[in-house]
Image (cartoon, grey):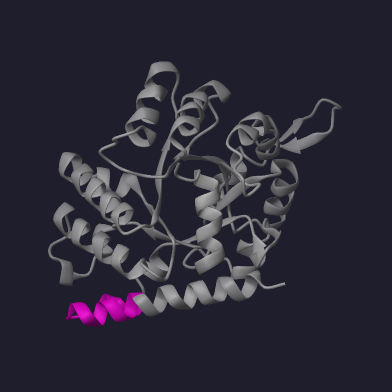
């Protein structure tokens, strides 16, 4: 039987490092080398990023919204990129931030995490702020298929403090940030997706721009793996990005750290006229980010 999501992710990051490469096809930033900005160029560019990740990074995170802007052709492009990554042996976290009730949530869960999905991925991001019942369909399907569920907790955007950091009284009347309440409420689901590695495939988003918050989140979330945005172009350094990681077999571990523009669209690749020049620039950017994170993970 294929290992569960958490075990596969932990094994892969122990081998290669914790870098997760974001595949975000911003139309204005796709190099002219791949053609006029649109779904065809996004497909070519996304597949090229996947190729440069092989042997350098174990995890990729396509951003669904940046493909969906092109309608059905964009969805086809997303499916092709996810399929290429899966066939290359990479772990795919689809950043779609789904969240809805009842049968609608079931549709999303089966559509992306179910057997035979047309958009193959190993995990999907979901929004918990409509309640635990909206997450249950995703966790239920993930249990059956060995997939993962990535729940927004403390995100990296400036507006995250508008709601996520609001103090809410706990059972003893003490004020705690809402994201801590979310993490604690997810305890039973975290346990349900726990693998042989001791880590859970119920992941939490813990932004690198709030390292103190990530440390608090780790204390509340126990065995949940973290998906950490905010490293690279958003300004957070490697040490801050790993504030919620803990001592493991080969140093700090506990999730993946995402970088998108800084590794998939580095300055050195923007003016590339030939595919080999672009390949080299992106390969070097991925290797540099991975090396920095691996160094930060050393105790």
- Left/right of residue 117 with respect to residue 61 in the rendered view: left
Q: Quadrant of residue 283?
A: bottom left
Q: Main secondary structure of the magenta part?
A: helix
Residue 31, percent from left and from top: 22, 70
Q: Nearer the viewer, residue 198 or 81?
A: 198
Look at the image and tell me whether residue 80 can be seen.
yes
Which residue lies at the image location 29% right of the left edge and 67% below the top edge?
51
Quadrant occupied by the C terminus: bottom right
Which residue lies at the image location 56% right of the left edge and 44% below the top edge?
203
Residue 67, percent from left and from top: 26, 48
Residue 176, percent from left and from top: 76, 37
Q: Nearer the viewer, residue 87 or 27?
A: 87
Q: Nearer the viewer, residue 283 or 86?
A: 86
- Left/right of residue 105 with respect to residue 271 in the rendered view: right
Magenta stretch? 267-282
Q: Is residue 149 above or below residue 237?
A: above
């Amino acid at each position: 039987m294929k290992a569960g999501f958490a075990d596969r992710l932990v094994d892969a990051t122990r081998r290669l490092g914790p870098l997760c490469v974001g595949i975000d096809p911003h139309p204005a930033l796709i190099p002219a080398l791949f053609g006029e900005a649109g779904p065809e160029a996004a497909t070519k560019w996304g597949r090229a990023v996947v190729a440069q990740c092989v042997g350098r990074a174990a995890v990729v995170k396509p951003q669904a919204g940046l493909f969906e802007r092109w309608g059905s052709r964009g969805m086809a492009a997303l499916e092709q990129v996810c399929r290429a990554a899966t066939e290359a042996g990479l772990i795919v976290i689809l950043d779609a931030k789904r969240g809805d009730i009842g049968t609608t949530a079931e549709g999303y869960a089966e559509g992306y995490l179910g057997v035979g999905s047309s958009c193959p991925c190993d995990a999907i991001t979901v929004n918990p702020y409509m309640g635990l019942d909206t997450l249950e369909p995703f966790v239920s399907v993930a249990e059956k298929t060995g997939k993962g569920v990535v729940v927004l907790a403390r995100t990296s955007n400036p507006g995250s403090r508008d709601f996520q950091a609001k103090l809410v009284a706990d059972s003893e009347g003490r004020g705690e940030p809402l994201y801590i309440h979310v993490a604690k409420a997810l305890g039973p689901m975290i346990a349900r997706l726990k693998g042989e590695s001791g880590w859970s495939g119920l992941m939490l988003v813990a932004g690198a721009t709030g390292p103190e918050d990530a440390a608090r989140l780790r204390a509340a979330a126990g065995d949940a793996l973290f998906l950490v945005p905010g490293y690279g172009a958003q300004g957070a350094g490697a040490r801050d990005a790993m504030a919620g990681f803990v001592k493991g077999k080969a140093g700090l571990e506990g999730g993946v750290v995402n970088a998108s523009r800084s590794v998939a669209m580095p300055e050195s690749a923007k003016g590339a006229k030939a595919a080999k020049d672009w390949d080299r620039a992106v390969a070097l950017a991925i290797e540099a980010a991975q090396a920095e994170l691996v160094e930060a993970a050393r105790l």
